[in-house]
Amino acid sequence: MANKVISVSATRVFVARLASCGVFDPLGDRVGKVIDVLMAYRKNLPPRATGFVIEISGRRRVFLPVARVTAIAPGQLMTNGFIDLRRFSQRGQEVRAIAEILGRKVTLLDGSGDATIEDFAIEKNKRGDWELSELFVRRPKNTALPFAKGPTEFVMWQDVQENKQNPAEQDAQQLLSTVADLRPADLATAVLELPEDRMIALAEELDDERLADLLEELPEEEQLEIMNELEDERAAEVLDLMDPDDAADLMQNLSKERTETLLDLMDQEEADDIRQLLKYEPYTAGGMMTPEPIICAADTTVAEAMALIRRKEVEPVLAAQVFVTLPPYETPTGKYLGVVHFQKLLRYPPHERLASLLDSDQEPIQVDTSISQIHRDLATYDLVALPVVDAERHMLGVVTVDDVLDHLLPDDWRSED
């Protein structure tokens, strides 16, 4: 079914608001999303928008010329349906608005000082060109308060002189405001498009929880670049907030000395989980498993199990089932008894005990099970998670379908054709 789209076209839009907005064909079907806006500088004239970097199916980045955009409305771009599927390659005279212009300093020609570009408008002129018209800028703060920000204002392009200094010297807080609303996966995609120095500067401005979410989505190389720039104390705080299996994967690539230093600084319970995961080979069930599934006793009621699933901090893939074991009920648990899937919980009254609902046909996997076998089991039985046990059938964790995908996809899958 075609998506419902707005037919009203704007003649003036702010580029930061275009990030991640949908791209639609003439029938209203979504064909991709906007990653950035390309601007071309011109002598004695405002920069002109030449087109958009968009992401289409398969994570392919392509160039959409502005001439093929028929309408721009809140949250969406309409195209004439013709999209060149060749991979995007930036030309020397083009500048990416979000990745390169936002955050730059400008000097106001009225002599009132400098400011930083937080956003800017592109406006359709009489010739049909989209050109930069107005800047939204922030002045330096005039107070010593640590969390205060400077005043903002709108200025016309002809009233400023742009300072094209090294992006590493630009204010990363301005870039942070541009990507503040992106989901972690989309933020990771945006970060991978930044030069290394701007990526590091942005990472340093993120709060610990947001940075932890970002690191979970980034390839190993970018993870290490960021981690190597963090002080040990902050790195430990961020690792505490990551899922243990993701943190363990990252720490596999750190030196043994720094790994031990960070583990000593982390919360003891989190560090113990990671130490356990680091004992196993990376591409085995033990190396990939999540040690924090939902585990219940056999006499737990459906109502009690549902309450555990509803907790905000439980990831959707872990909320799809509860596992039943003998005591203790934290990994490593007592003997594994079986699993109850979420859909089955919905079919029974709140007072029903899990013991009567157990699915014991699905065999758990051992810690040394290879990723290829895990992949086959998940696909064969249409599962989202597999319980992992030791030789005595004590449950140690679960391998989820997203864990497997993370390891099967190449490190650079976000930028592949």
Image (cartoon, rainbow, N blue to C red):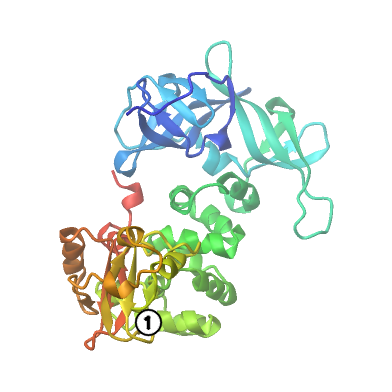
Query: Horizontally, is 36 left or right of 80 in the view?
Result: right
Residue 88 in percent (x, y) is at 36, 37
- 30 left or right of 363 in image: right
Residue 317: quarter of image: bottom left
Judge by depth and name the residue closer to the eye, 320 or 55. 320
Q: Mark 1 points at which residue?
A: 331
Task: Determine the residue positioned at 77% across, 60% down.
Answer: 146
- Relative placement, left or right, of 368 versus 100 is left
Query: Quadrant of residue 90 in the image?
Result: top left
Q: What element carries label 1?
A: loop
Q: Position of residue 390 (x, y in %)?
A: 25, 84
Residue 326 picture location, percent across and down: 32, 85
Q: Which of 363 and 290 is in front in this view?
A: 363
Residue 417 visible: yes
- The quarter of the image holding the N terminus is top left
In the rendered image, is residue 397 in sight? no
Q: Is 69 drawn above or below residue 381 in the view shown? A: above
Quarter of the picture holding the C terminus: top left
Report the side of 139 relative to 168 (left or right): right
